[in-house]
Amino acid sequence: MIEVVDAVAARQALGRRMLPCPDCGAALKPWGQARPRTVRDLGGGLLTVRPDRARCTACQRTHVVLDAGLLPHRAYTVRFLGQALVSAVRGHGHRQIAAELGAPEGTVRGWLRRARHTAEQLRLIGVQAVVAVDPEALPTADRGDPLAHAVEALVAAAVAVRRRFGGGPRDLWSQIVLLTRGRLLAPSPSG
């Protein structure tokens, strides 16, 4: 999975073989498209997407090129999921969040469980990004809740990256997806 900020620009770069393989670094070439899927956005909007696929010219592995506003294997946009995480940090339970967003309770409960389980890894990703880009933007308040620490660090990192490198009106949650390499609910195992 390759998360990109601009799927159109990534498609053009892929056509010119300018995207590197995340496994070996060789050039990727177009390899059709993934299956279409429909995802829910905030406000009840539905988006049908069909991400591009790429194949490495050297190691022959295939990859899906996914817009950073989406998460792999999720039927909701990252903005939708991010709103659920922010509501949880504000003290709302999964039932209340599900009702506010119009999502199934079990889905929201699963998101919150996974995010709480990996909160320390998420916080470290955020802190490392802030330290690399703008150490003065590092959050220092003690929130008492590991998920609150993680969300605060990730948002601070996304803001610092946007401030340093630009990126226009891009959604903060899309920046967070890029920082977590598309694994917001399932960071890579440590070690």
Image: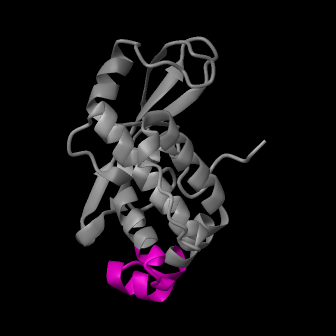
Camera sees residue 69:
no
Q: What range of the chain is rendered magenta?
A: 87-107
Q: Nearer the viewer, residue 143 or 52?
A: 143
Relative height, residue 55 to residue 169 (above, below)? above
Q: Is residue 37 above or below residue 132?
A: below
Image position of 72 with respect to 131: above or below: below
Q: In the shown orientation, is residue 101 left or right of residue 122? A: left
Name the residue: 52% across, 45% down.
Answer: 180
Per the picture, the main secondary structure of the magenta-coloured stretch is helix
Could you tell me which residue is drawn at 34 percent across and 27 percent down? 10
Q: Quadrant of residue 60?
A: top right
Please state the horizontal and vertical placement of residue 74, each as a whole percent of the image. Answer: 48, 58
Residue 62 colored magenta?
no
The C terminus lies in quadrant: top right
- Could you say where residue 80 lies in the image, as x and y percent from the top left? 36, 65
**Residue 97 covered by magenta stretch:** yes
Q: Is residue 87 visible?
A: yes
Q: Residue at x 29, y 21 (%)?
A: 12
Q: Is residue 16 left or right of residue 88?
A: left
Q: Is residue 138 above or below residue 166?
A: below
The residue lying toward the viewer, choosing from 24 and 46, is: 24
* Residue toward you, 101 or 48: 101
Quarter of the image where one finds residue 162? top left
Query: Which residue occupies 40% across, 14% down?
Result: 18
Q: Residue 148 placed where, x, y %?
A: 51, 68
In the rendered picture of this protein, how many numbered marks are placed on residues? 0
What residue occupies the far right of the structure in this picture? 191
Q: What x and y, as percent, mark residue 78?
A: 39, 57
